[in-house]
Image: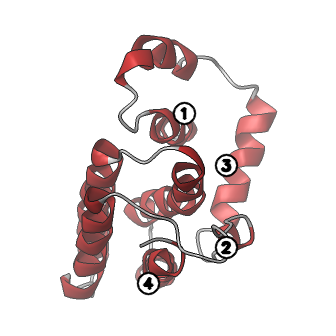
Amino acid sequence: MKHLIFTISLLALVSCKDHKNQESNTEMNTVEEPTEIREEHHNDEASDVYGNAWTKEIVMYNDEKWEANAETNEGVQKMQNSIKTQTTSTLDEYHKLAEQLNDDKNYVIKNCTMKGASHDNLHVWLLPLMAKIEALAESKTIEDAAKIKKAIEENINAYSDYFQ
């Protein structure tokens, strides 16, 4: 599981339309991280699946919102729609929401054409969201799933505070 989160995070960082370096990135993704670092990284993610500490790391562009490509904005709208429209009264429904959000998130990653600082800040927003979606998919209780869903919704809705 830890390997999956680590691999997904690395893929998200390097996958946004960077086809030229795909072979070297694949090799980099197979590099093993020392166990203590992986566990520390995983514990940091787990402690923030209910919050939005990422907001302390993201920066604005001269107090202006970052320009995002249309497909990224569309993917975020898909996530907002999924959160609003899917019923979540059972644990199975929360897990189905996680699957849908994961598909929506993959659309964002696949269609990202952003570069430079706007791209870097998108990842500040996206990586914690990915951890939250993964935590929702693995949630064991309705209470925990509801808290994670709330944190996901706050994360998704905060996108418009930083990107246009």
Q: Are marks 3 and 1 in contact (CB under 8 Å)?
A: no
User: Is the residue marked by circle 1 packed among few (<14), some (14-19), or many (20+) residues within 10 Å?
Assistant: some
- Rendering coords of residue 91 (x, y %): 31, 75
Alpha carbon of mark 4 to alpha carbon of mark 3: how far? 21 Å
SS at circle 3: helix
SS at circle 1: helix
SS at circle 4: helix
**Going 30% across and 78% down the picture, which residue do you hit?**
80
Q: Horizontal placement of 123 versus 54: left or right? A: left
Residue matched to label 1? 3
Q: Horizontal placement of 57 versus 119: left or right? A: right
Instruction: Give the mark, 1 or 2, whose residue is nearer the N terminus.
Output: 1
Front-most of 132 and 155?
A: 155
Which label number is shown at residue 42?
3
Indicate the colouring scheme: secondary structure
Which label number is shown at residue 55?
2
| Quadrant housing residue 113 | top left
Instruction: Give the mark, 1 or 4, whose residue is nearer the N terminus.
Output: 1
Picture layout, residue 68 above or below residue 92 = above
Q: Horizontal placement of 78 versus 55: left or right? A: left
Residue matched to label 4? 146
Front-most of 10 and 99?
A: 10
Alpha carbon of mark 4 to alpha carbon of mark 2: how far? 21 Å
Picture layout, residue 109 above or below residue 126 = above
Q: Identify the amino acid type marked 2.
A: Thr
Picture layout, residue 95 above or below residue 8 = below
**Going 48% across and 37% down the picture, which residue do you hit?**
4
Q: Identify the amino acid type marked 3.
A: His
| Quadrant housing residue 28 | top right
Q: Are marks 4 and 2 in contact (CB under 8 Å)?
A: no
**Going 74% across and 71% down the picture, which residue do you hit?**
56
